[in-house]
Amino acid sequence: MKAFAIYRLPHASQCTLVGQDGMPVSLSSLSELTGKESGFLISPFSMDESSAIVLLQPDEVRQLAPDQVAGMDDLPFHSADGKLTVSPCSRETYHDDFSRFHRAFSETGIQKLVLARSEDFDRKGCHPAELFARACQCYPEAFVTLFSAPQCGTWLVASPEVLLLRDSVQWHTMALAGTMRYADHLPQWSDKNVREQGYVTRYIKACLDRYSDDVSLTGPYTKRAGSLVHLCTDFSFNLSPDVRLGDVLDAMHPTPAVCGLPKEEALRFILDNESVDRDYYSGFSGPLNLEGQTSFFVSLRCMRIIGDRYRLFAGGGILPESDESLEWEETEAKMQTMLSLIG
């Protein structure tokens, strides 16, 4: 087996192992996808020469219980150490980034930006497959996946956010933005969180209207994800018969929930000014036409497993009224999703 992905859909009792003996396919653009391919798709935040869109086309697909996964010690873990050109983000670096991002609102006309950071932790002897099993137990409402391929290294994700999925009737997605600790949650959300969620909702609605004429919305409502809560709006829709799945994905990703608005200006600013190399953090992954299932989730709560280290990632939406200390605290809370697994 050259590459693999193990995933557990939200509230499912079983996991799916996807194994490929040869090298997975690297795509140059999401728009290459017609929707007729089959496999496990892994997309970075932004594709470049070191972060490819990867499609595992399985030679093996089988169902497992999470505790069976925990005992698997023969999986091929890739580290791809040559890609680690950027160090994790210190508190001082985050301050510099936040100041630079905040100035952009008056200097560029950008409405929203998402600022990410990362932090490294020593591995404590826990096998990645065991971490996956722990994540399945701790976060039953999340999409949990552990994947590894030569092009992208090894990643563990436990995400609450749907990018795009299809059931037997329709397609679905969501606008997920605004964050509070569950323990601190009050009935009234702040104006900042409401505005941020509104930006994401309007953007996704505009994207979907290009490919569907029957988009319906539900929300916003409060959605719990582990120790956090978010504001969420659900979308249901049908795609026109002549629409290519890759074009829809290309239009939606990255959403304002992980990038900003306007999309192209925000993306360029982040790539030019953010100190963190996001790599596959805030990208997305999931099964594509695999055993009748297409479900893509944004890689929000995730870690990269690199030799003797875990690199954890978190980010938050920045608006003109954002407070740096509160934004830092939000990233700390988001990192707890992965920290709670490694102890």
Image (cartoon, rainbow, N blue to C red):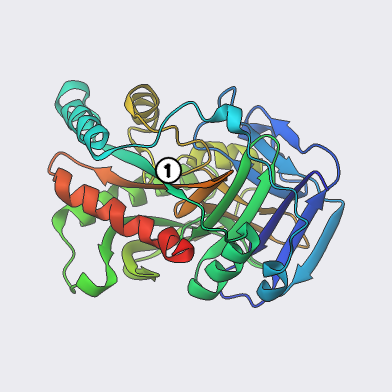
User: Label 1: few (<14), some or many (≥20) within 10 Å?
Assistant: many
What residue is rendered at 36% in x and 21% in y?
Answer: 272
The quadrant in which residue 176 appears is: bottom left
Q: Is residue 101 left or right of residue 307?
A: left
Percent from the top left, x then y, of residue 330?
26, 54
Residue 16 vs 11, above or below: the answer is: above
Place of residue 125 in the rendered image (x, y in percent of width and height, measured from the top left): 57, 58
> In the rendered image of this protein, does residue 111 appear above or below residue 273?
below
| Left or right: 300, with 63 as reference point | left
Work out which residue is located at the far front of the displayed protein and give it: 125
Residue beneath the point at 34% across and 70% down: 227
Q: Residue shown at 57%/61% (left/top)? A: 126
The residue most toward the bottom is 13
Q: Is residue 27 above or below residue 201?
A: above
Question: Of 331 and 102, which appears nearest the observer?
Answer: 331
Residue 28 placement: quadrant: top right
Q: Nearer the viewer, residue 279 or 205?
A: 279
Residue 259 sits in quarter: top left
Q: Is residue 3 left or right of residue 107?
A: right
Residue 47 seen by the camera: no
User: What's the amino acid at mark 1?
Assistant: Thr
Using residue 176 as the reference point, say whether residue 139 is left or right of it: right
Q: Secondary structure at mark 1?
A: loop
Which of these two is toward me, 289 or 5?
5
- Where in the figure is residue 27, as x and y percent of width and height? 69, 31
Image vertical order of residue 84 relative to residue 116, above or below = above
Which residue has dot 1 on it? 255
Residue 21 shows in this picture: yes
Q: Closest to the observer: 332 or 207?
A: 332
- x then y, percent, for residue 341: 48, 65
